[in-house]
Structures are given as C-alpha cells and as structure tokens.
Amino acid sequence: MSDGSSAGPLIQVENITRVFHVGGEEVRALRGVSFGINRGEWVAIIGQSGSGKSTMMNVLGCLDTPTSGRYMLNGKDVSRMSDDELAVIRNVEIGFIFQTFQLLPRETALANVELPLVYRGMPARERRERARAALDKVQLTPRIHHKPNELSGGQRQRVAIARALVSEPSMLLADEPTGNLDSATGEEIVRLFEQLHQAGHTLVLVTHEPKLAARCPRAIRLSDGQIVADGVGRDVALGTAPVVLAAGGA
Amino acid sequence: MRAFLDNLRLALGTFLGNPLRSLLTLLGIVIGVATVITMMGLIEGLRMKVNKDLGRMGAHTFQVTKWPAGGFGRINWAKFARRPDITMEDVHAIEEACPSVGVVAPADDEGGQKVATAALETRPSVRVFGTQTNYSVTSGLTLASGRFFNEVEALDGRSVVVLGTDVADVLFPGMDPVGYEVRIKGRPFRVIGVLQRRGSMMGMFSLDNQAMMPLLIFQQLYGKNRSLDVDVQAKEPELFQKAQDEVATLLRRRRSVASNLPNDFEMHTNESMTASFNQLSVVISIAGVGVCLLSLVVGGIGILNIMLVSVMERTREIGVRKALGAKRRRILGQFATEAVLLALMGGAMGVGLGFFLVFLGNWMLRFPMVVPPWVVALALFMSCGVGLLFGIYPAARAAKLDPVEAMRAD
C-alpha cells in the first residue's frame, strides 16, 4: 500500500484551485488552498455550506481533481491522474466514511466491508477474513450477516467505518460522519474516531459542526474557498485561532 | 476470472431481485429463440424424412408419379388432379420400350389401415403397400425373416403379406409372425416375411408401420382406378440419365403432351428430391431467420431498456463502487455481464420452450421434428450477442458516471 515515503507529510496540498462551470458561469469553489497533514494527525476541515469544504473533501478523496495546483498524497502526485488511476489511489490510500453511510442495500454488512478488497483483486477467503476482523474492530461481529436496512444508524456507520478500515488505507476521510445520527449515537462514533486516532490512523473529518471540530487536535476553517484559520481544533472551532491570510501557507 | 465470478453473482442477484420484470423483458428473446429452435426442428425433421425417402430408393433408381414429391408442395392440388393417372399399361410400355431400363416396380399405397389377428389389432395407422416382386430390388428392402412375395404370388394376386416390424411387434409380440394369418380390410392374409427395422425418428415417428402385399390384391381391396407410383431402375449406373430420358419421352408420347408443354407427371431422383426440398427449406429458413431476428431485436430493446433502468436505479451503488476503487472497466464488465446473462437466460428459456413445441409437434401432429445441437448452440450464442450489443451502451453509461454525482442520487 504505502510506498514507504514516510519522510514528508502524508498530504501536501499546494495552491489548489477548483473552478466549476455552472450554466456558463464560473464558480471558484477553491481559490488557492495550501496545507499539509502528517501521518497520525486528526484534522477537521470546517466551514459553512458554500465554503468549499465539500469540494476540498472530494479533492482530498481523489474523487475530483483540482483545476490547478498540486496534491501530493503519500508521495504521489495525484492532481493529474486519470479516472482509473484515481480509482486505484482511492482503493489503496483512502478509507471513506460518508454522512449517508453509502452502504450497498442489497448486500450484507460483511459483503459491504469486503467491497474495497474485491476491487483490489483479493481472493474471497482472504477478504472475508479481513472483513470479519474489521467488523470485529467496530464491535459488529454479531451482525455481520445483516443487511443495512436491518441495522440501526449507528450500526450502519460502524459498518461503513469497518469498510474504510479494511483496506488499511493511509487516511480515513469522513464527511459529516455524525450528521445523520442522534447525538448519543454520534458520540459513540466520535469515541470510535478517538480510538482510531490513538491507534495511529490519520483522520480527516469534514464537518460544519464546531462542536465536533472542537474535539479534533487540529482544524482548518475554509471560507469562500480559502483557508481562514488553521490551528488547534478548539480554537479554530470557537473562532479564537489566528486568521491565516489566503496567500500564506501554514 | 475472479472479477467475472463476482460479476456473475451480482447479475444473478439482479435477476432474482426482480424476476417478473426480468422475465417480461426477456420475452422477446425467449420467443425469438423458441422460433429458431422450432423452425430448425421442422426443417431438420423434413430433411431426415426426405433422406429416409431417398434412402428408400435404391441405386440408379428414379420414381415416376402423378403427384409431386413427398408430403409437401401440394399447393396446386386441382392442377395435379387433372393429370391422367399412371396406369399398368404405362408400366408395361416402360418395360418394353425403354432399352436402358432394367427393373420396373409399380406401387400403390393407402395409409390409416388396421391390421388384425384373431386376438390383436393395430391402431388404424398402418400404411399398406401394393406392389410387385421387383419392388424389393428398386427400394433396396431387406427382410428380418421370411421372404418377399415372388412373381407367381404377385401375378396371381395371392393373399400374402410382408409386415413392417412395428406391425409385427403389435400383432405377434415376441414371436416370428411368418406363417401366421392376419386380416386386412376383413380379408385374410398369410404372413410370409417381416421387413428389417428401418428405425424411427426421435422414437416417435416410425417408418416400420407398414404392410406390403401384391399389387393385384391391393387393387381388389382399394380399387383399381388409382394412379401408380413407378420405381424405375436403370440397367447400369451409366444409363441412369438415358433411362430417365427414354421414360420421359415415352410417357409424353403416350399421354400426348405437346412439345411446348412441361411433363404432366413427376420424375423424382435423389437429386431432384433433394433440390426441391432444399428450395423449400431455404424459404422456411429465411422466414424463420426473419422472425427470429425481429424477435431478437425486440428482445434486445428489452435488454437495453431494463439495463438503462437498472443503471438508473443503481446510480448510487455505482458511485459507491467507483469511490471504493472500481475502475471503469470493472463497472462496464459488471453491467455487460448482467446484460449477457439476462439475455442468455432468455435464450435458455427460449430453447426450453422450443423443445417443448418440438415435442408437441412430434406428439400431437405426428410430425417428426429434430433439433440439431448446433442450432441450440447458435441460438444461445446469438442471445449472448444480443445481450452484449444492447447491454454495452447502458454499461458504458454506468462506467462513465462521476462518483460524487452518482452518490448524491436518490
């Protein structure tokens, strides 16, 4: 998976822009964003809707490519890759956790967790073992043969987290992971993130909730497609962190 | 390979997830394939029937008849009915006036007859032949037991009969009928021989359900004023064409056919029968292929439709799969496999339906139909082709979906 280039930061984003053309109009969702994230960091990216955080999340997740700028992920320049090359990067480097879970409704929890390994071409027996292990990590072993509609919201998100973990990616990328959960269940998931962070996983969490961002060691605030604050999670979330100028890096 | 198996599993899941919709969608392909199977069964059955008939005629032998060949092509019944019958006098004239002709055997026949013993009776389905001794030469008959009737018996019109094996089996189960008495049309006959088994088609349509007697006695039973079928064998293989020319010339003169008119009788050789049959089978084949292609196109549109719906319904799923690392080719493969599998299932059902129709044809219409294996293979192959052809566009659409957009779909 990792090519061993652990010297530099895991993620290095340099002056990234992303321009959309919507009905003849130019929308500049990201206008020159630069930051780095090291291995083992837990970073929240926060911002109001329209701040560019979703676009940032898509670019970081290799679901989208920047219009200009450079994105180095685990030592590889992924900013100019083709669709299929990005598919491989997503498969190997990134574990996605979505707000709406994005589980396949017709498949069991186990089959859902196996999915990233299917696209890696792993033999069925091996991927089943690894999927079981991943489900065990999120304490879902008794429910591995249930389909998503037979699981509670919290359990679904655990399945999704297991699916993100199973491929041993270099980062977990979560998009509003508690957005569809009640506060108690959301709290469970956040605790799970804390455990994963302590276990050494790199976590990037995209959210609009200051409360959630405040619990992250580091947060980056986006506004109008630019970084306006980058610092300790609590400070950035509460607005007490120093404002970073658009031109300057971290 | 592993990818293929995964795709196969997914495709099966789709089918079983919505069996009724899938079934309805596949109807076009089912009908198309069933048509091909039935049509080809019909043609192959005819071909085998014709081949058996041809096999009946011995070497360098041709047949002169009033009616056109076989059981098909009798469209212009009235036109043929106006032809003069072929008579015993014609037969004698051929024997005397045609130097290239070796053996001549007139014959007449009647289907749907019963043969009975004191204790047992056949169904009214036996074909009774009246003919002469030479018939065993011209038709290359062989006997399982006993003998064919000799010239004395033929010329005297003695009440002797040679049975086909089916008739013998029904009336004399487990024993040799030679020497026993049977009754045909209420008249007693002594069995003097049993024909060698000639086989049946698919175990349903027997060629052994017949009885042969001297022509004279046949005419007493069934009437004299009937046109004869005349087997003519050339003296030598090299004289085959010459013998035909002599017979044709003779009959045209005897029947006063003007030189500008065609023959008012039929002459069948192996070649002419094969040719006329081939003509017919080509027509049937073209019609069959046309119906089939049409159905397959309809079926293909069905596949196209269901696959487009399937891609739309599963946009989100496709998005998730792509996000988790599925390459375009993989998604394309998944949906193409699904389309091909669907089409193949339709094809398989069509084959099943086709065989059922063929079975019905054999059983109810007593028409021999045979489906050659290559037709089944071809039908399934065409189904796959249709699936791939019409499935590739929806699959390509799925493969090109943007994962972010796709995951946002409801």
Image (cartoon, helix red, strand yellow):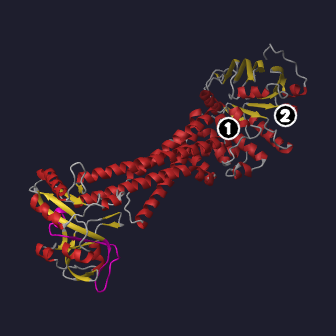
For badge 1, the amino acid type reads Val
Q: What residue is drawn where x is 46% and y is 61%?
A: B356
Instruction: Determine which quarter of the picture holds residue A190.
Output: top right
Q: What residue is drawn where x is 29% and y is 86%?
A: B118
Is residue B406 found left or right of B24 in the rendered image? Answer: right
Q: B2 or B4, which is in the foreground? A: B4
Q: State whether residue B31 appears in this view.
A: yes
Is residue B46 found left or right of B165 in the rendered image? Answer: right
Q: Residue at label 2? A: A212
What segment carries the magenta color?
B111-140
> How many neighbours does mark 2 have within 10 angstroms: few (below 14), some (14-19), or many (20 or more)?
many
Residue B132 drawn above or below residue A110: below
Say what secondary structure mark 2 lies in: helix
Instruction: In the rendered structure, find residue B320 and report the number of the disc placed on it.
Output: 1
Residue B131 drawn above or below residue B358: below
The x, y position of residue A33, in whole percent, is 77, 19
The x, y position of residue B173, in whole percent, is 28, 79
